Amino acid sequence: MGAALCLLSAAGFGAMAIFGKLAYDAGVSPGALLLVRFTLAAVLLGIILLVRPGLRRAASGSPRGEAAGRPAMTRGRVLAIAIGLGAIGYATQASLFFSALQLMDASLLALILYTYPVMVTVVAVLLGRDRLTPARGAALVAASGGTLLVLIGAGGVSFHPLGALLAFTSAITYTVYILVADTVVHRLAPVVLSALVMTGAAGTLGARALLTGGVDLGFGVSGWLWLACIAVVSTVVAMLAFFAGLKRTGPSNAAILSTFEPVVTAALAALILGESLTPVQLAGGALVLSSVVVLQLRRTGTRRQDQGSRPASGQPDPGTHQTSDPARDGRTETADLAS
C-alpha cells in the first residue's frame, strides 16, 4: 500500500511539468503559477477537513510513530514544523525549481534534481532512520540509473551554471524537506499535514507577491484550467499520497519510488505534447519500475517473516510480553489505511 501511494504521488508530481508547460502557453507567469497553486490547494484541503472532520485524526498504532523510538514532541512544535515545511521548505524548493527552469532545459534540470533520492538515502542511513540493505541499495542504483537514461534519452541539453546551481540547491532543499517531514508525518493525519504545508507555502508566496508588486492574474480561462489541474492533481492528490506513502515506507523508499516522476513526465510528453520516447528512455523507465519491484519483494518477504514469527492468538509475545489479538491488529491496520 505504501509503495502504491508513493507511485500515485509520483504520477501526480510527474504530470505537473506538462500542466505547467500548458499553463505557460496560456500566459501564466511562474509567480502566478506558484501563488495560485498553493493558495488553491490550501483552500481545497481546508474544505475537505470541514466536510470530513474524521480526517483530522491521526491513525493510532502507526508503525513509524513514537513506538519506533522517536522523541516526543509537543503539539505546538509539531504544528510549527508542519507550517515551516511549507513556508520555508516547499516554497523555497518550488521557487528554486521554477527559477532554474527559466535558465536551462527541463531534462538537465530534472537530472540534477533527481540526485535527491541518493542524498535522502545516505542522510537517513547516517541519522539511523533507515538501513542500507542490499535490496534497498540495488533499488537505489536501478532507480538512479533509470532516471539518468530517461533524461539522457531526451536529447541534447544546454548547460547554464547559475541554473545548475539553483537546481542542485533545489535538490538539497527537497532532501531536507523529506527528512524533516518524516519526523512529523506519523503525528498528524495526512490531510491535516498537507493543509498546513500548503498554507505555509501560500503565506510565504503571498507575502513575496505583496513585497514585489503582486502577480498578473489576467490570463484566460485555459490558464485557470491548467492551474486547477496543477492544484488538484499535482498538489492536493500528490501531496496526500506522498505523506501517506512516506508514513508507511520511510524516507529512503519514498525517495527511491519518487524517481517514477520523470518516467511519467516523459510518457505524458509523448502522449499529450507529441514528443517521442526513445529506446533509451524506455530502457530507463523499465529500470525505474524494476526498483519498485525490488522494494515490493523486500517488503513482502519482511512481512512474511514477521507473520511467521508472530505468536498464536492469545499467546504472549516473548519480545514484548503482550498478547497477540488478531481482531485488534485488524482494526489498527484498517485505521492506518483510512488515514
Image: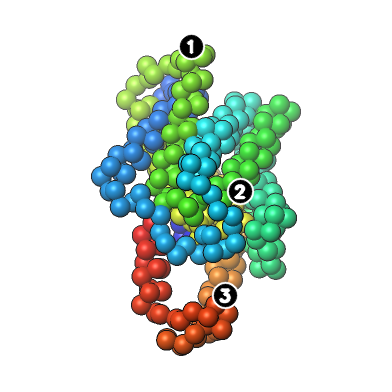
| Residue 257 x %, y % | 56, 56
Q: Identify which residue, 311 or 290, lies in the foreground.
A: 311
The amino acid at mark 1 is: Gly
Residue 6 showing in the rendered view: no
* Residue labelled with disc 3: 302
Q: Residues within 10 Å of mark 1 (few under 14, many from 20)?
A: few
The amino acid at mark 3 is: Thr
What is the CA distance from the residue labelled 3 to the residue labelled 2? 24 Å
Mark nearer the viewer, 2 or 1: 2
What is the CA distance from the residue labelled 2 to the residue labelled 1? 34 Å
Q: Which mark is residue 245?
A: none
Q: Which mark is residue 213?
A: 1
Looking at the image, residue 101 lies above or below residue 4: above
The secondary structure type at the circle numbered 1 is loop
The amino acid at mark 2 is: Leu
Q: Residue at x 44, y 50 (%)?
A: 188
Q: Residues within 10 Å of mark 3 (few under 14, many from 20)?
A: few
* Residue labelled with disc 2: 179
Relative placement, left or right, of 10 versus 294 is left
